[in-house]
Image (cartoon, coloured by chain):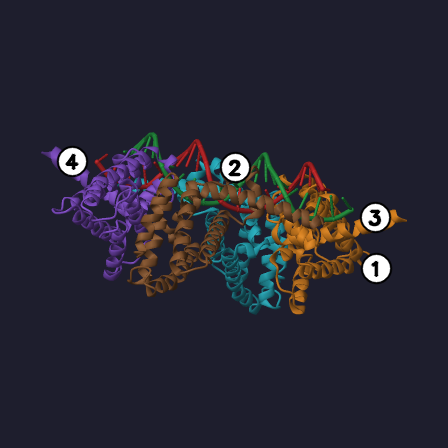
Chain colours: A brown, B purple, C orange, D cyan, E red, F green
Amino acid sequence: MARTVNEKLREERRKQIMDAATAMFSRQGFAESTIKDIAKEAGISHASVFLYFANKEDLFHKVVVEHLDAAKKAYQAELLVEGPPLSKIYALIEGQIERQLKNTSSISLIQYVVGYPERFPALAADLKQFVAEFVDTLIPIIQEAQQLEQIQSGDAYYMAWSWFSYISGIGMCHMEYSEEGSRALVTNGLRIFGPK
Amino acid sequence: MARTVNEKLREERRKQIMDAATAMFSRQGFAESTIKDIAKEAGISHASVFLYFANKEDLFHKVVVEHLDAAKKAYQAELLVEGPPLSKIYALIEGQIERQLKNTSSISLIQYVVGYPERFPALAADLKQFVAEFVDTLIPIIQEAQQLEQIQSGDAYYMAWSWFSYISGIGMCHMEYSEEGSRALVTNGLRIFGPK
Amino acid sequence: MARTVNEKLREERRKQIMDAATAMFSRQGFAESTIKDIAKEAGISHASVFLYFANKEDLFHKVVVEHLDAAKKAYQAELLVEGPPLSKIYALIEGQIERQLKNTSSISLIQYVVGYPERFPALAADLKQFVAEFVDTLIPIIQEAQQLEQIQSGDAYYMAWSWFSYISGIGMCHMEYSEEGSRALVTNGLRIFGPK
Amino acid sequence: MARTVNEKLREERRKQIMDAATAMFSRQGFAESTIKDIAKEAGISHASVFLYFANKEDLFHKVVVEHLDAAKKAYQAELLVEGPPLSKIYALIEGQIERQLKNTSSISLIQYVVGYPERFPALAADLKQFVAEFVDTLIPIIQEAQQLEQIQSGDAYYMAWSWFSYISGIGMCHMEYSEEGSRALVTNGLRIFGPK
DNA sequence: TATGAATGAGAGTTCATTCAT
DNA sequence: AATGAATGAACTCTCATTCAT
């Protein structure tokens, strides 16, 4: 019992720190985020951070990985949609754009890894894998849609990358959210696949 | 005369520093780039950097602004192309994609400002202005093309932003350059505008 | 009754901690030994150490004092040997050398006090007293042996100190134990007294 | 010229730091000496220490090695004495005892390496080599003296070690210097070799 | 003009110690 | 009684910036 309570408390504190760190890292990047600031935001002393994470890099790592996992789960859920391949693509597009526009910290976090991969080799590898998996997931769906002549033909690999670039760029640009804007970005993004 | 020679030398040194700084900042970001490393790469002592730039932030500012100016000149040149609006758009697309794929340091530099605008308020303003100008330049061309029914109708503002997102994402993704890939990205990117 | 049991348990825990601390302190000195490591070695939580000792210095103090007491008892026992003074000296020599060679943690512990007496004034005083007592104990035996012309004449005080230096040096040098080496050190050490 | 002046200044500062560090380390050991204190004693800012030494361990290493080198030079000089082997041994004894008694920081420094060799593996190796060299230097002189029947026979290796222990112990014991004491220690120390 | 030397401020990290359970 | 959680103080080391030459 006590065990459970403690573990729960521990998990809560951990989450507090992760949340504070996510905010800090995504806004200021790794180097300009200080443990002190993160701790303050989490409402604890800076020494306590080290009770939950081995060091600053470990914390960053955990934060980024958590983020990638969430993103993966999200797009996988969207692709579970029933129906013809184009419907899946459409669901993906809507979901990812919505998330990018609303969840502002999403890409910011990853940018620092993308921009300086040598600094975070482990994370860079994780990230590479994440992207590869995403592309690999998307390719067969694209090909199916192409065979059904629902979208334009063309190299499915690059089509997936084009989409990934588009959605990454949207996340990076920090546009303000609006229903109208969101719809327009969806419409324009869908065109990358050339729906017929 | 001597004055002129000195000024020339001064300008050369400045450029050396800017180049070194550009490389450093775009690879490692602002915080993880040190004046010492930049100076070493430029072949001078680290104290000398302060003879040419007020401080580290000033140097960063100058580097980013130089970058924005070059990018502006480049896209303006592409839009000078004679012919119907779609040709201009096409020229722009080809040029920007080529540049993003080849000039890898391009976006990296700006990412650090985009990702943490409060840290560099002056630069963030410059950047906002740059994007606004780009969009404002593109909008009338899009509208013209729409009136000529060369491309899909739809809000030109968001179309411009869609394109900007796409091209930004490409820069961020650090894909390796290949003729084939480049062509595919151009084809898929063009579709954002829905050419008829 | 319960009281007695508790006291016994308490004493056991205390001993566990002292043993762990003795090992730690003698290997790594005071500053580089951490309470956490000592506690881990003793199989308890680090907070519990403070239930048995006021603080780290107190623990160190107790450990060193225990050590001095044991050493005192040991040499006193050796001097109880029956027979002429030279026999006592010989018994002492054999015993101390044996202990120094085998009980490697012996001197190590004390070195840290000897080397930095200002840091541990109370211990330094205890240690000074220990040495003084040892010397005072040895002097009359030496003088007796000198009167019996069993050993060389000469200032008994410095003779005692010479022996003490020798035995201290042996402890410090961490030679590996061997029967042969032990015997040689005994023979050579005995010569300090100049046996006839 | 300027070069020479600078180098000289640099060398002076380096020496200031080394001296301060020697004093600090020999009194308080590695762990309890702080860079801040060393810097203060050397009359500079703590950051400046790192202009001359890579880090604290490097400084410690240099200090200890310097010390070993000086000790080696000293005993080598003493063994250059002309005459029969016993004279050399006598010169060595007198010199080493004198140095141990007067140069109080001598052994203290090394104690911290001896006492915790795993902590300073490189230094421990240097130290081991130093001792091995000393012993190897002494052995043939002892053997020569034995052949001339100037001293007792017996394993020269252990005789050298016995002497080394004696002299180490003297250094460790921090006796106050007095002419009389010095002479007594020499006399008693010489007896280790059993002069005839 | 150019630079090596110098430093204060601040970073991450550790650890003895206290406290609530 | 025993412990995990928490923290303040202190440490090593870095770096942008200033200064004397």
Mark 2 to mark 3: distance in Å? 47 Å
Q: Mark 3 — residue?
A: C7
Q: Position of residue B10 (x, y in %)?
A: 19, 37
Mark 4 to mark 1: distance in Å? 99 Å
Q: Chain of mark 1?
A: C
Q: Residue furthest left?
A: B1
Q: Chain of mark 4?
A: B
Q: Mark 1 — residue?
A: C82
| Label 4 Cα neighbours within 10 Å, binned few <14 / some 14-19 / many ≥20 | few
* Residue at x-position 9% and y-position 34%: B1
Q: Chain of mark 3?
A: C
Q: Secondary structure at mark 4?
A: helix
Circles 3 and 4 in contact, beta carbons < 8 Å: no
Mark 4 to mark 2: distance in Å? 50 Å
* Mark seen at residue B7: 4
Q: Secondary structure at mark 2?
A: helix
Quick check: can you spot residue B24? Answer: no
Depicted C39 relative to depicted D43: above or below:
below
Q: Amino acid at mark 4?
A: Glu
In the depicted view, which residue is nearer to us: B157 or B18? B157
Foreground mark, 2 or 3, reads 2
Whether discs 2 and 3 lie on one chain: the answer is: no
Mark 3 to mark 4: distance in Å? 87 Å
Q: Chain of mark 2?
A: A
| Label 2 Cα neighbours within 10 Å, binned few <14 / some 14-19 / many ≥20 | some
Q: Mark 2 — residue?
A: A41
Foreground mark, 4 or 2, reads 2
Foreground mark, 1 or 2, reads 2
Mark 3 to mark 1: distance in Å? 39 Å
Depicted C173 relative to depicted C32: above or below:
below
Q: Is residue A33 left or right of residue B15?
A: right
